[in-house]
Image (cartoon, rainbow, N blue to C red):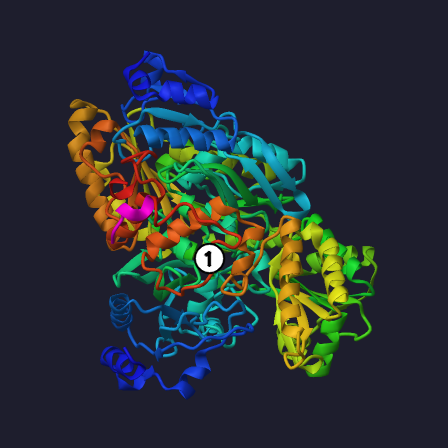
Amino acid sequence: MSDVLDRTGLAAGLESAGIQWRELADEERAADAVDGVQPSAICSPATYQEAAQALALADRLGLAVSPRGAGTKVGLGNPPRACDLIVSTERLSQVVDYAPANLTVTAEAGLTLAALQARLAEGDQYLAMDPPNGGQATLGGIIAANASGPRRFGLGSARDLVIGTHVSTTAGTVTKAGGRVVKNVAGYDLNKLYIGSLGTLVLVTEITFKVAPRPTAQTTVVGRFAGVDQLGQAVQAIVRSPLLPTAVDLLNATAADSLAVGGVPDARGGYLLATLGTAAGRALRRQRDDLWKICQHAGATEVADLADGESERFWSSVAERPVQAIGANGVRAKIVVPPGRVPDVVRAIEERRARFGDRPELGGRAGSGVLYLSWDLFGAEGVDGQASSTADSLRELRARCQALGGSLVVETCPRSVKNHLDVWGDVGASLAVMQRLKAALDPRAVMNPGRFAGGI
Amino acid sequence: MDRHALAQKLQAIVGTDNVLWQDYDLMLDQYDGSIDKALPQAVVFPTSTAQVAEVVKFCVAEKLPCTGRGAGTGLSGGAIPLEGGVLVIFSKMDRILEVDLENLRAVVEPGEVNLHLSQAIASTGLQYIPDPSSQKACTIGGNVGENSGGPHTLLYGVTTNHVLGLEFVTSAGDVIEVGGKALDTPGYDLTGLIVGSEGTFGIVTRVTVRLSPIAEAVKTLLAIFERVEDASLAVSGVIAAGIVPAAIEMMDNLSIQAIEAAVHAGYPTDAGAVLLIEVESLAEGVDEQVAAIDAVCQHHHAREIRIAKTAKERNLLWLGRKGAFGAMGRISPDFYTMDGCVPRDKLPEVLERISEIGRRHGIRIANVFHAGDGNLHPLVLFDSEKPGDEEKVRAMGYEILAVCADVGGALTGEHGIGFEKREMMCLTFNDDDLDWMHLVKETMDPLGLFNPGKIFPTPGKCWNPHLGRTGRLTAVGW
């Protein structure tokens, strides 16, 4: 038995609480490591109460916990200061309550988004979230990372769609916030605090979402632009029009060339702007026609449209690009700016192009101002040899994004790069408030210590 | 410190003309739209963030309660200075600081009146979505405090969905920026935490909001029903048919009577209930949606469906709804506005149970509400001159919200807990839930000076705190 398990009494504590757990074998420790920090054990609580007991036990023993869903976002964040126990949500994977007539669904955190969507499809409804890793990612992981996809432009992100949570705390309690109705201002909106907190405050065990009727048809208009200025004009025209598109995405040539979907114009070194319309009936044709006109008017050199199945495949592919763009030594930065500043970001990246690998991939939510820049590190000097210069390039680009009123978060990169860089960047004067919240809700820094912004 | 000395200290911060402290002045700001009141010791009208920060630091140094206030239109006692202290009113911080069309954002001061923003930018084709019924008077700062809604939240969401950033004076008097024009700011979503916190964490001094395109086409229809149950079933029917209108508002017979006596919106006074339904989309889309809604209403025995043909007709239909609360004076000396939210499919059951509560107490209840969201506004009609009525009304309020809680609903959809509903929090939250929320309160406001007496029940009554000051938080100082 490992030193931590034995010395700290973790094994005995989990046993006596009746929580399913096991010690990790050496090779599992390496596989389950968070940025190289290896856990000793994994437990799989079957109830919210058991999860709370596990966290309280870790709190009492001074151990570090890393919550785990499908593990698709384990590379997000700074390297943890410690990671002793993985608390898995694998046994918390039920749909708790699906109320189609109320357009709400309540599910446990370990349920995959794909499984939830399958259930909602039975009611001709869906959860309007399409983050990457859509097949494997769990609801809890998506919420913890505030992951999002193309449809956030028209339908919102987690902060707009989550209306209630149950969480297990390091105080050993199970608490709730919000509820199961679509309008609710009773008590503090702690849901917002948990979304994107990367498991550093509590373990979210149950989530209630607003859901929506599934669109009956869809259309995607794709315009090819030689330069970013024209593309920017098209985006402005679209987002300020009453066309109410569901998604407005841009793809640079690398991203466009990687899509395995037919009917899409060849980027030919330029950019694609793709807009999804999901209006019903005759309004759908109007969306398509007007989007064509806007693209042409803004100077698109080619325009095409995709209908239903083709359109659906296109957006599934686009949603997955950020995670598929890179291999094991890849770097992915999430860049967020006020939406009108997207062309400036694209230009800033073009100007520094040589610093982001051979053919950097850039794509994302042009209408929302959320872009992903990805490239693989390789070359004669090796990954570690490039770590310092890569960190410098990211820092310099981050400064530019901050000057534009935004941020740059490095979502994935080799551990050696993290040695040279805070992946979150400076969060400003509000850090003091964030640190106070962390200190109050997780005073012994049990939950994912060190992975979050500002060393939280 | 006596009140005059207090006033002099505050005058040194915000200027001589920007402080009220005499009894007859203070009485103007002791109430809101609910039935409770309390006097502050002084009222200040700051003109800048720096002044607000100084006022906050002064209050902290003197251990004086500090409560932010917008237009005082709130309906839960949220802006009433329960424990006295300094009331910070934003009528002199009411500017639109920036309209940023390219980024679809606006930056406003908290005292900016909700409707003025949409009016100011109407020519740009953009609007600010949340539209509380009091939008002609209520302020964005107040909306942020209570996370206000409005009829059109059904399709577009409430205040929190449209507020992206805040400038915030912490309880230590530090000015911080949270969120901003860009989405997904790294770190915890403090913007989302502060919106709806009812002024209990500190004071918001600037708000960055999202602007949205004005819909190209709007159609408004009035569906008239003999029975409330049919109207309720029609609401569920519309949602079940996969249609999400911009708004579905319900008014029952008593409300219709009041509205017609006051504003003559053309609602039939013999109807059991009317639904005011509005759809917004592209021109090609609205007719199809109206046709689908028409079919659902017919199926649920609507006796007549009127579709507004002109903007004038549409405005008249909305005049009735937006003027409904004010119209209650025509049928009752006083009324008490409740605000619960229930799953939409529970509406028929809940309306019947509320009606039964009224019958049992011998007090009339009118219903005017956001049916599409399941957000009820029972208006309890009473006479404050009549001995016993007010006590009865408060008891009924509790019973009504107990029904909402019983069917899995919420105690408030958009008005806030405030003072009014704090003792009812235990209907939906247990000790652990409240402890956890209070831990956040203590973290944000360790001295408990900001809008004291709101949201949380009196300890020892229905809530027995066991976390907090005595335990976890002692090590955390500002």
In the image: residue B266, left or right of residue A256: right
In which quarter of the view is residue A254 placed?
Answer: top left
Q: Secondary structure at mark 1?
A: helix
The location of residue A381, given as percent across then percent down, is 15, 23
Q: Is residue B477 magenta?
A: yes
The location of residue A338, given as percent across then percent down, is 35, 55
Q: Chain for mark 1?
A: B
Question: Residue drawn at (50%, 34%), measured in percent from left and top?
Answer: A109
Question: Residue drawn at (37%, 86%), measured in percent from left and top?
Answer: B22
Residue interval drawn in magenta: B472-478
Q: Which residue is mark 1?
A: B160
Q: Quadrant of the C terminus of chain A?
A: top left
Q: Nearer the viewer, residue B330 or A265?
A: B330
The location of residue A78, given as percent across then percent down, is 27, 35
Residue reaching furthest to the front: B460
Q: Is residue B388 magenta?
A: no
Compared to residue B85, the image places residue A240 above or below, namely above
Name which residue type carries label 1: Thr
**Residue B117 in sight here:** yes
